Image (cartoon, grey):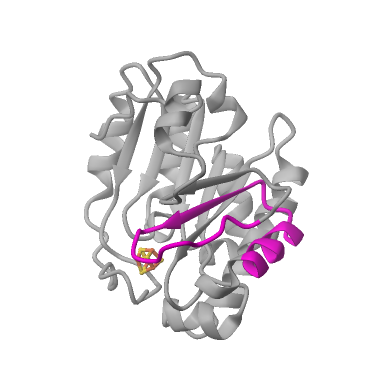
Amino acid sequence: MLLNQDIGHLEDGVSAKIIRVGKGCNNHCITCNSCGKDFGNFSNALKKIQNKGNSEQVIFTGSEPAIQPGFIEAVKMSSNLEYRSIQVISNGRIFASGDFTKKALEAGLSEILIKFPSHKKDIFEKITRVPGSYEQTIQGIKNLKRRSKKFNYLFEAVVVCGIYITEDNNNEIQETVGFLEKLDVDEIFLINTGELKNIEVPKTKVPIFTLGFKSTNRYEDYVKKGVLSPKTTDF
Ligand code: SF4
């Protein structure tokens, strides 16, 4: 996610606009109550983006921002205002539409963090509780990788997959990471929420960022190295 090289090389003091939009999501994950179709008011998000200040990043989050009406417009606006990084945290399903993916990338979306619970359909959909979500998310990742190379001549969007470790998926994290490696994702973000102890960090050639593991990368270490900004601000 935030280990993108571009961000790593930004000077100290860079901050982000974290835009939380609506409460609607087309998944119904067992660990989340952000279901339903309450999309809130996207115009407030646009105002926050316009008030750029010294921010260099926009991060769209809050349920499923990419399915909300106005998302592409907000990405375009961010791009026109020359934010250096425009990110979305997503379940990836809407990117199964090649047309939507093309529009989002051409609007300037530069980084997509996709929640990916498991390489196994039954576990994946036990967590998301939506039949067909597994295939759509995988197709979304493939479209993003393929179209990023094809349509963005100046840069390639970064695709990051985030695995939240739960009792359902913790026994096969290594296999899930291997599966994502084959999909050619750019980074993997692994989060242990703390209830499961002694989980090994999987081996992978893909850059991996971990949270909640005893002996590995910690947020503070990245801040010290200047890779993450301690001044991320929430508007
Ligand atoms: S995809 Fe994210 S926002 Fe949607 S239900 Fe799952 S955890 Fe919640």
Q: Position of residue 157 (x, y in %)?
A: 63, 41
- Count numbered badges in the picture: 0
Q: Position of residue 227 (x, y in %)?
A: 51, 26
Q: Residue at x 38, y 54 (%)?
A: 65
| Residue 147 sits inside the magenta stretch | no
Q: Residue 165 lies in what quarter of the image?
A: bottom left
Would you say 219 lies left or right of 93 here?
A: left
* Front-most of residues 2 and 153: 2
Q: Position of residue 151 (x, y in %)?
A: 73, 43
Q: Residue 17 lies in what quarter of the image?
A: top left
Q: Which residues are magenta?
A: 174-202
Check the picture and name the quadrant holding the C terminus: top left
* Front-most of residues 198 and 139: 198
Would you say 149 lies left or right of 69 here?
A: right
Q: Residue at x 55, y 25 (%)?
A: 8
Q: Residue at x 36, y 59 (%)?
A: 193
Q: Residue at x 44, y 39 (%)?
A: 218
Q: Position of residue 54 (x, y in %)?
A: 35, 16
The quarter of the picture showing ligand 1: bottom left
Whether 140 is drawn above or below 207: the answer is below
Whether 18 is drawn above or below 211: the answer is above
Q: Residue 27 lies in what quarter of the image?
A: bottom left
Residue 43 in sight in this render: yes
Residue 139 in sight in this render: no
| Residue 188 sits inside the magenta stretch | yes
